[in-house]
Amino acid sequence: MPDLIHDGDSAAAVSSLRSAVMLLSRRLKHQRVDESLSPTEMSVLGTLARCGSATPGELARKEHVQPPSMTRIVALLEAKGLVRLEPHPDDRRQKVVSQTEQAEAMLAESRSKRNAWLTALAEGLDEDEWETLRKAAPVLEKLAHL
């Protein structure tokens, strides 16, 4: 792989990609179903949907926050009926966080709203641009999870 920092064209592409991803992310975040949830709370619910049940410590690592912060987030989500805490099967000192059916339904509605918004936006692309974006989607997905 070429050295991205020293290759001027690649460095410009990285800068353009960063800027575009940040702007698109901000715009997608505004397409929320439940305005009472913070972006962090939505992210935690998304992580539970993708990865399944987890301890608060595991969620903190996946979300890149401190464990005490995650404990507060989980408590807020539990109070809203979006997660439930159950005893850990192997460690009685720990709890396992799972999303509720209410959270699953809200996430499905949110995904649907965001997908519809993004679909409408993509309708402004020509066929070649759409094909390029369609082919780039798996690469962007991989990049997001590295």
Image (cartoon, rainbow, N blue to C red):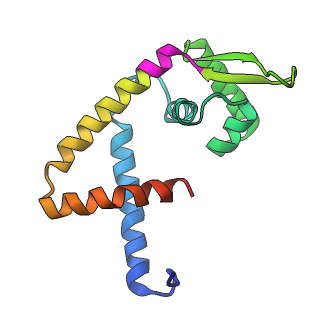
Q: Which residue is drawn at 38% across and 65% down?
A: 17
The overriding secondary structure of the stretch rendered in magenta is: helix
Residue 32 makes an appearance in the image:
no
Q: Say if 95 sits above or below 128 in the image.
A: above
Question: Residue 23, image x and y in percent?
Answer: 35, 53
How many numbered circles are shown?
0
Closest to the observer, 36 or 62: 62
The image shows residue 13, relative to residue 117, as above or below, that is below
Image: 113 above or below 100: below
Residue 100 sits inside the magenta stretch: yes
> Is 115 displayed left or right of 10 in the figure?
left
**Drawn side of residue 30 relative to residue 77, left or right:** left
Residue numbers of the magenta segment: 99-105
Tell me where residue 24 appears, x and y as whole percent.
34, 50
Q: Which of 69 and 141 is in front in this view?
A: 141
Which quarter of the image is occupied by the C terminus? bottom right
User: Relative to residue 27, is residue 95 depicted above or below?
Assistant: above
Q: Where is residue 38 in the image (x, y as percent from the top left)?
A: 50, 30
* Residue 67: x %, y % from top left: 75, 36
Q: Residue at x 66, y 20 (%)?
A: 75
- Residue drawn at the location 50% of the way across and 87% of the way down: 6
Q: Can residue 52 be seen in this view?
A: yes
Q: Residue at x 43, y 26 (%)?
A: 107
The image quadrant of residue 15 is bottom left
Q: Is residue 68 magenta?
A: no
Could you tell whether 6 is left or right of 128 in the image? right
